[in-house]
Amino acid sequence: MTGMTPIDTLDTPALVEQLAQVLQDKGWMMATAESCTGGLIAGACTDLSGSSHWFERGFVTYSNEAKAELLGVDPALIAAHGAVSEPVARAMAEGAVARSRAQVAVAVTGVAGPTGGSAEKPVGTVWFGWSVGGQPHTERQRFDGGRAEVRAATVHHALRTLLQLLRQLP
């Protein structure tokens, strides 16, 4: 992967192009499990022509019931930790892989705002989950701005980190 533009300088469409190349080189498919972004990550991926070669499916699981029904997230996990939490983000990513033909998944669950925030989980709080070749990864971020800015930053971070994780594989 030498000679490629550094990830931190890429805009979202350029990230998607590089992600597509890495996934195709591995012969892997990708799935998304989205709550706060409502399908924007899948949309960014499928904006690229030919994405059917590496993008398998997207789950938009905005409600807690959808997370349980479509991804197999245990309702007790949501009750114990809240939908915006590390265990739920991890379970969403793992569920997306388990319920698709993908080897890679990204999941996001957060508070895009302007309503819904709390002292513990203020507006802009997003938990990310990635499953890459069977290995889970999670991370919490907090983004500033209005709803559109939080959602756009979430899409970009989800894709950028997925590309980084894929590039770190042997």
Image (spheres, helix red, strand yellow):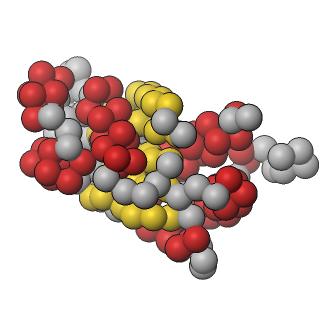
Residue 21: image quadrant is: bottom right
Residue 32 at x, y percent in the picture: 40, 54
Depth check: 113 or 74 in front?
A: 74
Answer with the quarter of the image where residue 141 lies. top left
Q: Position of residue 168 (x, y in %)?
A: 70, 34
> Along the line of sight, which residue is nearer the eye, 156 or 137?
137
Quick check: 80 left or right of 134? left
Residue 116 x %, y %: 16, 40
- What is the residue that sits farthest to the right in this orientation? 3
**Res 122 visible:** no
Residue 16 spot, x, y in % from top left: 61, 60
Residue at image position (18%, 23%) is 81
**In the figure, is residue 169 to the left or right of 87?**
right
Left or right, 113 with respect to 79, comes to right
Using the image as rendered, state which of residue 77 and residue 29 is in the foreground.
29
Question: What residue appears at the point 31 percent right and 44 percent down from the top-left corner?
Answer: 95
Q: Is residue 6 left or right of residue 64?
A: right
